[in-house]
Image: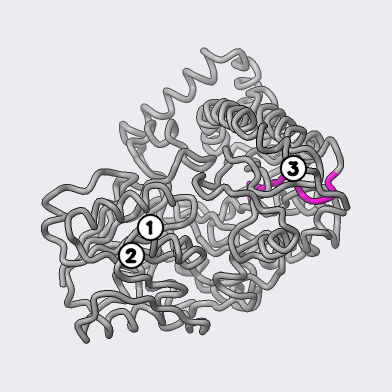
């Protein structure tokens, strides 16, 4: 069987980093881990080709070669996923569709005309699909309520990737999260009992990447890396040894719940394993909103103190924030700005609350008759809320625009980065010195030219850089990298403002017909 694996385009989002990737001759931040895991789960005597549409177009020769086209997508990739299905069907190809998007909204895959829907977790549903093909079936839907044992998941087929096109690689240690946030679809897709791989299993994946020549960053894509703290500590104790034996070839980032701050041993193990950044789901500093959305883990201690502990342990925080919770009081955007600046969080992802299919939030709003028909729009940071909120949506949207704009005002951004790096715990891993190549030198020169000479913040840039050399010299490269990131955020904040304002104009007549929900 000749299988063409297609990964659809992402719209321009907070994480696109186009301008930054151009500096280092890369095209995409992360690879399609799900698709290369699918390739590993299918019969290995099949032939595979993978095309990441974020890197390049599919050729006619590749379509002609394929007997089967498999497309995997998240909801944010909806537009191009449906387009790729259309293109494959136009050429008479057998099409299978899987991933979080069709798992949440299978009827949209059926409407698009796919032959097979491979839903839920592939360790269980892919063998069902293969058996159907072997029986000669040409259509079907494969679902399961069972959660697979991920210790049996094979090493992803990293060899199918155009490795040089990616800035970082992806690996996964666990699936699922123990918490119950109302808006989150992870617990719907993967359950509330975190399932982890064996440490030796994950190290084999790293061995494979090492053999393929990978020597850059790796993102641990777990939605909550510390969901099972016992098992993650077992992994980290072996990982830090592996890293030392291999002279620290990889730098890790991941996502974790903010209760990470309460476990100093865990943070120390992460830093010793060469983790340098962690994404935290903070959502809002408003405790009432956190309780309403059932994010109780963020109400047990001071969030500002928690972030400070994480920074001082040696982990740079990135954080997610949401505006538009039920019962939210006016000024939520300003409160988020104040929190981000007080906590010295350089990178703050910000979005308007969205009800994702089948979540507790979606089900509640559906019962209350508050969901809006927003099915034609991608869900990202440039999308208005897809439900009727409890305060005027125009008010929420304007606070959102203002907060996003303010957070990425150049002077305020580099001030936060500076404050973060001044108190950031020093790295505990020392990789051998590597002579920078021409691409790296050119990128460095471009960042210094733009930040140190062209921008109005140039004097502050130099002040902060020399301050870091004096007080925490080990992190100067990370500081320059974050300065470069704001090239992307400056452009993206304009996109956010333009898109949200346009949608407000487009939806205003519809909104006038709706009454605000009262609590």
Residue 32: which disc? 1
Quadrant occupied by the N terminus = bottom left
Among the two numbered marks 1 and 3 on one chain, the one whose residue lies closer to the N terminus = 1
Q: Are marks 1 and 2 in contact (CB under 8 Å)?
A: yes
User: In the structure shown, which secondary structural element does the residue marked by tag 1 occupy?
Assistant: loop
Task: List the residue tagged with mark 2.
Answer: 36
Between 112 and 346, the one lying in front of the other is 112
Q: Which residues fall within the magenta stretch? A: 315-328
User: In the structure shown, which secondary structural element does the residue marked by tag 3 occupy?
Assistant: loop
User: In the structure shown, which secondary structural element does the residue marked by tag 2 occupy?
Assistant: helix
Q: Is residue 142 visible?
A: yes
Q: Are marks 3 and 2 in contact (CB under 8 Å)?
A: no
Between 366 and 482, the one lying in front of the other is 366
At 44% across and 41% down in the image, what residue appears?
11
Q: Quadrant of residue 490?
A: top right
At 77% across and 33% down in the image, what residue appears?
395
Instruction: Specify whether residue 48 is painted magenta.
Output: no
Between 113 and 343, the one lying in front of the other is 113
- Pinpoint residue 95: horizontal percent, then vertical percent: 27, 64
Q: From mark 1 to mark 3, how far is it between C-alphas?
A: 41 Å
Task: List the residue tagged with mark 3.
Answer: 514
């Amino acid at each position: 069987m000749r299988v063409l694996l297609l990964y659809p385009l992402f719209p321009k989002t907070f994480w696109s980093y186009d301008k930054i990737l151009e500096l280092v001759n890369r095209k995409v931040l992360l690879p399609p881990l799900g698709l290369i895991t699918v390739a590993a789960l299918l019969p290995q005597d099949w032939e595979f080709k993978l095309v990441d549409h974020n890197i390049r177009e599919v050729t006619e020769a590749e379509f002609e070669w394929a007997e089967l086209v498999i497309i995997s997508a998240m909801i944010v990739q909806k537009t191009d996923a449906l387009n790729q299905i259309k293109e494959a069907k136009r050429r008479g190809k057998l099409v299978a569709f899987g991933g979080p998007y069709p798992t949440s909204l299978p009827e949209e895959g059926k409407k698009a005309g796919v032959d097979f829907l491979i839903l839920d977790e592939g360790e269980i549903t892919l063998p069902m699909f293969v058996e159907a093909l072997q029986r000669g079936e040409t259509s079907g839907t494969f679902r399961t309520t069972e959660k697979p044992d991920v210790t049996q998941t094979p090493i992803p087929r990293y060899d199918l990737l155009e490795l040089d096109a990616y800035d970082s690689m992806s690996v996964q240690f666990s699936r699922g999260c123990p918490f119950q946030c109302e808006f989150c679809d992870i617990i719907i897709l993967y359950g509330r009992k975190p399932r982890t791989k064996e440490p030796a299993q994950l190290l084999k994946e790293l061995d494979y990447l090492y053999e393929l020549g990978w020597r850059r960053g790796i993102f641990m894509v777990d939605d909550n890396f510390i969901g099972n703290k016992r098992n993650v500590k077992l992994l980290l104790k072996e990982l830090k040894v592996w890293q030392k034996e291999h002279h620290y070839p990889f730098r890790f980032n991941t996502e974790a719940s903010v209760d990470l701050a309460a476990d100093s041993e865990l943070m120390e193990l992460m830093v010793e394993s060469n983790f340098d950044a962690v994404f935290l789901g903070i959502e809002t500093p408003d405790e009432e909103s956190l309780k309403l959305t059932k994010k109780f883990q963020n109400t047990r201690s001071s969030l500002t103190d928690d972030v400070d502990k994480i920074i001082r342990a040696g982990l740079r925080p990135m954080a997610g924030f949401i505006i538009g919770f039920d019962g939210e009081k006016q000024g939520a955007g300003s409160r988020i700005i104040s929190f981000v600046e007080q906590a010295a969080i350089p990178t703050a992802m910000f979005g308007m609350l969205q009800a994702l299919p089948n979540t507790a939030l979606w089900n509640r709003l559906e019962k209350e008759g508050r969901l809006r028909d927003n099915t034609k729009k991608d869900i990202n940071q440039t999308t208005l809320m897809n439900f009727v909120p409890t305060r005027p949506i125009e008010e929420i949207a304007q606070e959102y625009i203002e907060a996003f704009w303010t957070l990425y005002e150049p002077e305020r951004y580099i001030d936060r980065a500076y404050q973060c790096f001044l108190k950031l715990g020093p790295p505990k891993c020392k990789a051998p010195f590597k002579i920078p190549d021409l691409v790296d030198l050119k990128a460095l020169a471009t960042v210094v030219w733009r930040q140190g000479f062209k921008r109005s913040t140039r004097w502050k840039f130099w002040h902060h850089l020399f301050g870091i050399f004096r007080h925490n010299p080990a992190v100067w490269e990370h500081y320059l990298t974050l300065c470069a990131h704001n090239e992307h955020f400056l452009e993206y904040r304009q996109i956010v403002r333009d898109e949200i304002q346009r949608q407000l104009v487009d939806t205003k007549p519809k909104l006038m017909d709706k009454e605000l929900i009262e609590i």
